[in-house]
Amino acid sequence: MPNDNQVPDIVFPSGFRRLVGYQITHWAENEAKVAVALDQRHKNRAGYVHGGVITTLIDTAGGLAGCYCPEPGHVRRCATISLSTQFLGAVQHGTIVAHARVRGGGKRLFGATVEVHDQAGALIATGEAMYRYRTGHEDKRGVPREDAGLDDVD
Amino acid sequence: MPNDNQVPDIVFPSGFRRLVGYQITHWAENEAKVAVALDQRHKNRAGYVHGGVITTLIDTAGGLAGCYCPEPGHVRRCATISLSTQFLGAVQHGTIVAHARVRGGGKRLFGATVEVHDQAGALIATGEAMYRYRTGHEDKRGVPREDAGLDDVD
Amino acid sequence: MPNDNQVPDIVFPSGFRRLVGYQITHWAENEAKVAVALDQRHKNRAGYVHGGVITTLIDTAGGLAGCYCPEPGHVRRCATISLSTQFLGAVQHGTIVAHARVRGGGKRLFGATVEVHDQAGALIATGEAMYRYRTGHEDKRGVPREDAGLDDVD
Amino acid sequence: MPNDNQVPDIVFPSGFRRLVGYQITHWAENEAKVAVALDQRHKNRAGYVHGGVITTLIDTAGGLAGCYCPEPGHVRRCATISLSTQFLGAVQHGTIVAHARVRGGGKRLFGATVEVHDQAGALIATGEAMYRYRTGHEDKRGVPREDAGLDDVD
């Protein structure tokens, strides 16, 4: 069973994860945390984190929260249906973390709420998102990785 | 008066714009287009564009649409209040474009709707976002660039 | 084929439609208009239309837009997945109209964007919503009304 | 200091509150609960609660959460900027309750997150909304009721 330290090794990073540089720091059933250490590349021209960085973390964390798969060698995949974000504070420095929790859903769809905090613990954004499982990925046991295509929510 | 080709020279790119590689391809009063040529860096692990790329384009285009400033040497700045996105289609290749239009608002706030199309013209996402002007930037004549800090919506 | 005047006769009103008093004024493939003549019952304490009236019109119009069924005696049903609204102006009097258009989707899901105008034609809100078809209602020919339960999107 | 039982007496109901029949069941600093006992009037044609009832409760509870005013005879007013809702479950009977909490904001704007539960405690919807204080209502001491116009968030 994965612990937090093992998480980054389990999922080979996507192109956009490598580009933005975020990390999966926690992943369990119905829950995930995704973090990024801010530097100049994440900022808008005023020196604050770009809104797109925040929405990227929310989208990623929410999808992972619903796609945790305890079965060894198996994965689950989903696609985002809708995503909303409220921006409550600006941040310039440090590591920001998006913490997502699955809040409900049915066989094919699930919804997550997400909170994004800065390094001092201040809430800088809230988000909510709906996702659908890819066909064949509805069951929590997932599908063998080799049959799944690569994971598409990180 | 700027034409489309001149736009990229007018605004010095932010860190996140350079990282993601999007371009401002049109900018006029109450309207903006932002585009990115997709490559491996923009994708999730299934090979489709990451949702965070789409929300980044929507956030950026919507903010620019309300911050166009016809006054030479002047700029306007805003901050995003809220952003929502609906994902209507997946895309793997080509250039995607977010087209934003200001739809209303008052002295301090404005709202934009945004459509994102793929290179074949298919609608892949819709978005809507509310923004507030930075204090001192409410007037459409903006403020001298040297007094403004750098622009924070691109 | 129904024209606008016939629409209100086609769909027997739900409890909430009767309570709020909105009317379906246009219904065609991928499009619907829902209107309400404002009176004291629709207002907040400052005398403006309550936000809940506007979101009700958006939710209803968007769902209808995806559930138009040209087959005589047949209906389609859906359920709302997510709904977002931007409030761009206040209104006190007259008839307000929500105009919804389906913008995309797949076999089971669809997305709509909605604009709400006041009687003078000013845009007072924009909305976007995702819906899923009820199981068995995915096909545009719908199902016989007697097999459908009653329609749940008005 | 108001307790829960006193709340309904403090605020004279708006037209839409009377029409829909919801009650303010809790109101404190940065928090509010709004409830409605479902009957036929709140339903869509399939016999489930209409989405517009849920968004009405979310909008109302979120606004109240930011407008609690401890000063006797004083009130605060706000207007909704944006509202998003995720629908996670259907409900037919019993009393549903929207519980809103203010999550952040600045001098003029605030954001709330809202959860809607059915009578058995199941989560049926989540929402988030941004509001702006009416000019003159930014301070938590509010303004004398007679100078305020009537409250516009209930």
Image (cartoon, coloured by chain):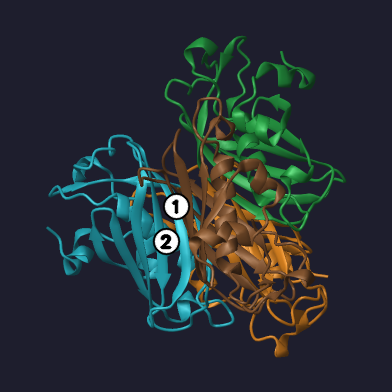
Chain colours: A green, B brown, C cyan, D orange
Query: Which mark is on residue C141?
Result: none
Q: Residues within 10 Å of mark 2 (few under 14, many from 20)?
A: many
> Is disc 2 in the same subunit as disc 1?
yes
Where residue C107 sits in the image (x, y, percent)? 32, 36
Q: How much space separates mark 2 and mark 1, taking CA atoms?
A: 8 Å
Please tell me whether residue A35 is drawn above or below residue C30 in the rendered image.
above
Asked if labels 1 and 2 touch by Cβ distance under 8 angstroms, the answer is yes
**Could you tell whether D110 is left or right of C121 in the image?**
right
Q: Amino acid at mark 1?
A: Ala
Where residue B1 sits in the image (x, y, percent)? 54, 73
Task: Give the chain of mark 1.
Answer: C
Where residue A70 sits in the image (x, y, percent)? 63, 15
In the rendered image, which quarter contains the C terminus of chain A? top right
Instruction: Tell me if residue C131 can be seen.
Output: yes
Q: Earlier in the sequence, mark 2 or mark 1?
A: 2
The residue to which callout 1 is attached is C129
Q: Nearer the viewer, residue C106 or D150?
A: C106
Q: Who's the residue at 35% across and 60% down the image?
A: C100
Query: Which mark is on residue C58?
Result: 2
Please tell me whether residue A134 is drawn above or below residue C7 in the rendered image.
above
Q: Who's the residue at 70% across and 62% down the image?
A: B151
The quarter holding residue A37 reads top right
Numbered disc 1: secondary structure? strand
Q: Amino acid at mark 2?
A: Ile
Q: Who's the residue at 14% across and 49% down the image?
A: C73
